[in-house]
Structure formats: structure tokens, C-alpha cells
Image: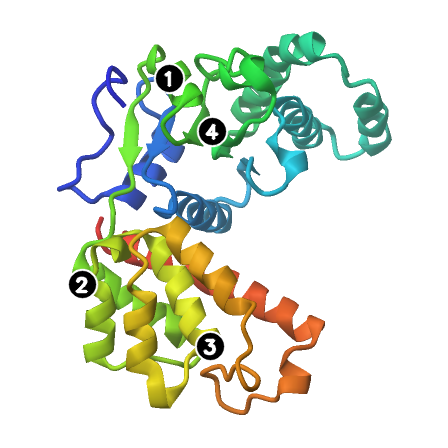
Amino acid sequence: MPGAGAPASTPNERGTTKTLDTHAAHGADGQDLVVLGESGGGKSALLANRVHLWRQAHPEDSVFQHYLDASPMSAGHLALLRRLMVAIMRWCQDENAESASGAEEERLPVQAEEIVKALPEYLGRLDYHCRQKNVGAVIVLDALNQIEDGEQGRRLVWLPYRMSGDIRLIVSTLPGDTLDALEDRNWPTLTVEPLVPDERTRLIAGYLAQFSQGLSDQRAERIAKVTAAANPLYLKTLLNDLRATGAYDRLDQQIDDYLQAQDIPTRRANREKRLGWRGNGPIRPVWPGYNPQRDRSEPRATRGFAQRKRAWRLSRPLVLAERG
């Protein structure tokens, strides 16, 4: 981010997870942290993993996370702020004040100007609560570039230039309006670097191992040496395609076909086209014991999606952790 101050880490330092944990614990000279990296580079997976581990290690801390690309309802900054205010109310309420908190939630401002104006007061309450209880507070806002509230939202006029006291703020974004709006704040940055070949092969092995599957070293290296495989999302979609449609007798040909797509949009287009084709019979996936009637049912499909999501959330950050 040009003009955004000295980076929090350099490509050679690879201290990604250490930098996030250090910022959550100690801050950065009163400034907040911007996480950068290309689309599909693993920013969301990294933040989700670190939030999960931070909550385990510091259960007394107040931790708020919001993913703006999770759903259409999550992409508005006003809904984000109201959700944060409700969280602060609940953190700061007395043990016997649950009913009072519910009444206060009903009195939350609803007009845009009033919501933005009330935010500093709520952050002040959170800071006071943290000081009184000797605990920390971490706020994580992922994918700020997904804000859909027009110019007012994307210019980030609603986001404080600096958090109160010991509250730590970590945001992630892609180049564009929101990143431009952050430049004047001079916040330190942390760049999630693309995967190097050795990390790609370990990620392939680690991800497929979650499903008791794997590829030979030769096949894994053939995938890993492709330039596009430096992007974790590209790698994930390719591996999921192999899991869903791979056949042992033509696996090498399928890998070659899949690797012809050298970017994520082309991979997605090819995948959608391929999923609409059934050939002379059902597509046979790689996993053993496959039953077309059972395994294509909606409940199993839903479980499979959740399993893939969890496996990726575990595998990608583990590779990053080994950098630092």
C-alpha cells in the first residue's frame, strides 16, 4: 500500500501469524493493522484461524469478527456497526443486567448518521470495560472491499482513524476505494505472500489428508510447479475438482486438463461447464465406497461442503504458521 507507512512484515520475513498475534496483544504504536494480499490468497482463512486460536488462548478477551463477503446482509457498514454495538453491550453488561441489555438493544439508533455518531461512545465503553477487567479487545473486519453501501461506506468515513485505548483493530482489503481511503491513516500493513513451491506441495498433502486422500509426489509436484498454484484459492478449487471428478485410470489426463486454466476465473468457468456435463454415466469421484444415490443426497452434500471448508481453514494457516 504506497504511502501507508512501513510494512508490518516483508516477503522475506514470512512472520505472518506472529505479526497478527503481536498486534492483537500489543498493538502497533496506537495504530491499527491492514492485511493485504491478492484475491484468493488466504487472508480470510488466516484471520479466521488466528481468531479461533486467540479465543482459545484468551477466553476472557472480547473478540469481534465480521466477514463482509459472508452474505449480502453482511456487506453493509451500518449493519456491521449495529452488530458491533450489540456485542459491546453484552460484553459490558453486569451479570444481572440481561433484561436491561435487551431494552438497550431496542433503543439502538437506526438512522445512518446517528449510528456513526454513537460508535465512539460504545468503543469508549468497551475500552473502560477492558481496563476495569484487565482484559483485551480485538476487532477483525475482513474484506472491507466488499462494502456495498456506495461512496459513503467505501470511503470509510464511519471507521475511526484510531481505536480507543487498548482496543486492537485488524482489517483486510483488496486494492480499490477502501484501500485508497486507508492510505492517509498511515497504518502498518501485513502482506500475505503467494505460496512458494514447497508450501504448495505441503498444502496439497495436508488438505487431501483431511479426507484420507492423497496424490503421488510426482503428481503433487506437477501441480505445485504451475505459477497459478501460488494462489491458494486456485489450488483449492483444483483439488476439489479432482476429489469430485477424478478417476484413477485417467487422473494424469485430468490434471493436465485442469492445469490448462491459468487463473481463477478460467478455472471457475471450466468447472461450471464441466459440472453441467454427465457424459455416458455418473461422474465417479475419487473417494472409496461412493454410492451415487446416497452420496448425492443434499444432507451429505451439505456435510461435504462443511468438511471442505473446515479442512481448508485448518490446512492453509498451518502452512503460513511455518513461515514465522
**Circle 2 crowding by C-alpha within 10 Å: few under 14, some 14–19, many from 20:** some
Residue at the image position 44 percent from the left and 75 percent from the top:
243
Dot 1 and dot 4 residues touching (CB under 8 Å): no
**Circle 1 crowding by C-alpha within 10 Å: few under 14, some 14–19, many from 20:** some
The reply to whether residue 137 is visible in this rendering is: no
Depicted 217 relative to depicted 35: above or below: below
Depicted 323 relative to depicted 109: above or below: below
Residue 144 as seen in the image, left or right of residue 8: right
Real-space Cα distance between discs 3 and 4?
A: 34 Å
Q: Which residue is mark 1?
A: 180
Quadrant containing the N terminus is top left
Real-space Cα distance between discs 2 and 1?
A: 34 Å
Depicted 192 relative to depicted 250: above or below: above
What numbered label is drawn on residue 163? none
Disc 2 or disc 1, which is closer to the eye? 2
Amino acid type of the residue tagged 1 in the rendering: Asp
Task: Label 1, secondary structure: give it.
Answer: helix
Quarter location, residue 292: bottom right
Position in image of residue 134 (x %, y %): 50, 29
Residue at the image position 83 percent from the left and 29 percent from the top:
102
What numbered label is drawn on residue 245? 3
Amino acid type of the residue tagged 2 in the rendering: Lys
View extreme (front): residue: 280
Q: Which residue is mark 4?
A: 145
Q: Which residue is mark 2?
A: 225
**First of labels 4, 2 by sequence position:** 4
Real-space Cα distance between discs 2 and 3?
A: 22 Å
Residue at the image position 56 percent from the left and 86 percent from the top:
281
**First of labels 3, 1 by sequence position:** 1
Position in image of residue 90 (x %, y %): 70, 32
**First of labels 3, 4 by sequence position:** 4
Amino acid type of the residue tagged 4 in the rendering: Asn
